[in-house]
Amino acid sequence: MLRDRNKHSMAELLSFPTIGALLLRGAEYGAFLVQFLRWWESRGARGGGALPVPDPPERDERCSRYLNRCPVCLQAWRIPTVLPVSGYIFCYMCISRHVRQAGECPVTHLPAAEDSLVRLYLQ
Ligand SMILES: [Zn+2]
């Protein structure tokens, strides 16, 4: 008797209008889920502090030797130019010649290319 009633209620539950209502509700939840995922993604793209800012690189002890002068010619810079791979500043002529010949930073020996040189505008 009880089982029969359950079967009956099951059939009632799966009647056409009920299924339609379920599908409609499913679509609503799906739309909500899409909106939520978009919001979640945009939150991350804005850099909302999800990833910690890395520490700055350690100070290279050699840099005090070359304070305000070119590590190659040991003179005041002529056309100050930075080698981004190491952060050292050279005369443009000194560093472009060295990198073209040696393919590395003269101080740190990190591999470098001439086209990575950046002109610095200090004044
Ligand atoms: Zn120089």
Image: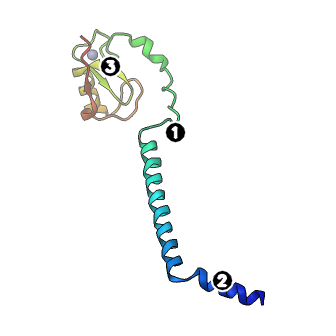
Q: Who comes first in sequence, dot 1 or dot 3?
A: 1
| Real-space CA distance between mark 3 and mark 2, rounded to the nearest whole angstrom | 82 Å
Q: Which residue is mark 1?
A: 50
Quarter of the picture holding the N terminus = bottom right
Q: Cβ–Cβ below 8 Å for labels 1 and 2?
A: no
Residue 2 x, y percent position in the rendering: 77, 86
The residue beneath circle 2 is 9
**Label 1 vs 2, first from the N-terminus:** 2
Q: Nearer the viewer, mark 1 or mark 2?
A: 2
Residue located 36% across and 21% down the image: 88
Q: Which SS class for mark 3?
A: strand
The numbered dot on residue 7 is: none
Who comes first in sequence, dot 3 or dot 2?
Answer: 2
Q: Kindly report the distance in space between the C-alpha atoms of the residues bearing marks 1 and 2.
A: 49 Å
Residue ID for mark 3: 89
Residue sitting nearer the eye, 22 or 70: 22
Q: Amino acid at mark 3?
A: Ile
